[in-house]
Image: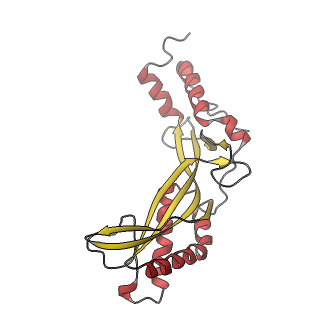
Amino acid sequence: MTTDVFSLVEDQTLLQEKTLVKVILENELGLAVQRALNTPSVTPFPAKNINEAMELIKTALDDFVVRSEDTEDAKPIITYELPDIGAEFETITISLEKREPGAFGTGAPFEQKIKSRQGVLRETIHNDPNHPGYELAVIGYWYDNIVRVTCWARTNKQANEREIWVENAMEEYGWFFRYSGINRILYEGRGPSQIINVNNQKYFGRPIDYYIKTERLKVISTKELEQICVRLGIGQNLS
């Protein structure tokens, strides 16, 4: 049972504004969605948002490079940017290709009909350290994402070999992603081959797609909501 976030408020002079803030907060939480659908992420570390998840992928690939037996000039560059004019090494790029509200139920990712379009109450902090007597609500927002890892090389053969290398790395570091706060990461498949021209030189690309479920956390302060209502004059004419 969720504790009333206004249970500790003693100042009755702003009761009208506090009641209005409560309505705003409950609408923001989407309590019906909370009861029907979601459970907290089960990972040792807090849930990661999509930017943090992509950074974890880069960290894992960078570590796999360090562990590899490649010579220094054969090691790939891990980046978020496409190969530029001066790129002489193989390049692995990480990009976000698709992002939707998190879905639940049976079926493959992106095929479920029920989507979490509202925030879900994760935690109520009964004593706001910055505003004694008020509370904080931690809201979670689920997202379904497709992250693309693309291997770029000067030849088709190099690109194919690096693609297998990336797939092996992602499998080997699966425990690391889950441990670090990524609730779910799945191999989605290989995308269509690509060719780009950089300074009249061809680069061959092999994209690999991964499905990742992430959660973005937001902290809502009942004191700040109350102050916003007062500044905007919301509820002043209510009786």
Please name the residue shown 57% across and 20% down the image.
15
Tell me where residue 141 sits by quadrant. Answer: top right
- Residue 228 sits in which quadrant? top left
Residue 65 appears at what percent x and percent y?
46, 81
The total number of labels drawn is: 0
> Which one is in front, 128 or 21?
21
Q: Position of residue 227 (x, y in %)?
A: 45, 28
Between 237 and 210, the one lying in front of the other is 210
Q: What residue is at 55 percent from the left and 35 percent from the top?
A: 134
Q: Is residue 172 left or right of residue 78?
A: right
Viewed as shown, does residue 41 lie left or right of 82?
Answer: right
Residue name at image x 49 percent, y 59 percent: 52
Q: Is residue 10 above or below residue 111?
A: above
Is residue 149 at all visible to an observer of this figure?
yes
The colour mode here is: secondary structure
Q: Position of residue 68 (x, y in %)?
A: 48, 86
Quarter of the figure that contains the C terminus: top right
Quadrant where the N terminus sits is top right
Percent position (x, y) of residue 44? 63, 63
The correct choice, above or below, for 128 with respect to 223 in the image is below
- Is residue 3 visible in the rendered image? The answer is no
Q: Is residue 83 left or right of residue 18?
A: left
